[in-house]
Amino acid sequence: MRDIDALIDRTNAAYSARYTKALLDRMMFVGDPLADRAVAALHERNYDRAADKLGAVRALAAEGNGAAQKFVGAVATPPDWLDRKAIAAGQNVMLGFVSLSRLSLMHSLFSGGVFARATLVTRATGRLGANPATRISETGAFIGAILQPGGLEEGALGHETTLRVRLLHASIRAWLKRMPDFSRDFVGEPIDQTMLAMTLSLFSYLNLRSFARLGVRFSEGETEALQHLWRYVGWL
């Protein structure tokens, strides 16, 4: 396996007391243990090919499977910091600029292509190869569901879709790790915590920066609401 420092160009890297080089390097080898164990339970029961993985995990939980129960229980318990009013405010901000939102979010999606480790995963799955329009439309539908009023309430389309994406990521991790050629050449965990943090920053920070370049200025409260919205999506 290649050394991390041989893979990453740190020329312009900057670290804080909270997010140190050591922490970020370690997070490259951390996936999503809760979802990964739930997907492993599906694999053990030959349910991993189920089209509705969220439904399959819930069915396993109802049967008493421990890994599935922990996943279902965790996502059904909102974090203490969750502010539903801030979520609604963030949704309203984005819905107030629908046309510009589409443009800025498209920029965010394409910007992910500059991260080599992320593109190795998308290339391996073929999601941006033969039919990139499908991936783009799916991402647009996902974001649209999140931004609908009440879309992140438990049981709502945005909430359910976010959980399905989480289990999809876990399934992709498991699949790629079973591929000898991929696991030998890839450094770290597929769709690891740094990749997920990068993706959230594309849809939050980079999205806000795109709005600024388009001439839109948000208040501090609006900016905080948007960041809170994506923080909750990341938590789910």
Image: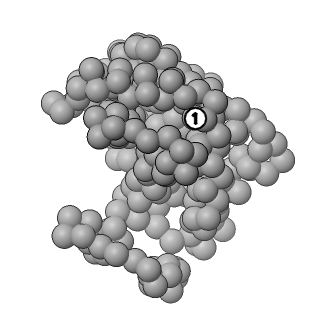
Q: Residue 182: in sight, yes or no?
A: yes
- In the visual, does 203 lie left or right of 90? right
Q: Position of residue 77 (x, y in %)?
A: 23, 24
Amino acid type, label 1 = Ser
Q: Nearer the viewer, residue 223 or 227?
A: 223
Q: Quadrant of the C terminus?
A: top left
**Residue 59, image x, y percentages:** 43, 17
Q: Is residue 173 above or below residue 70?
A: below
Q: Residue at x 43, y 27 (%)?
A: 93
Using the image as rendered, state which of residue 103 and residue 169 is in the foreground.
103
Give x and y (percent) for residue 167.
48, 35
Q: Which residue is mark 1?
A: 101
How crowded is the residue under tag 1: few (<14 C-alpha within 10 Å), some, or many (20+)?
Answer: some
Q: How is this picture coloured? A: one colour
On screen, 142 above or below 179? above
Within the image, what quadrant is residue 65 found in? top left
Foreground residue among 76 and 223: 223
Q: Position of residue 39 (x, y in %)?
A: 46, 37
Residue 160 visible to an observer of this rendering: no
Q: Is residue 167 left or right of residue 193?
A: right
The residue shown at (50%, 86%) is: 6
16 with respect to 181 (left or right): left
**175 lies above or below 37:** below
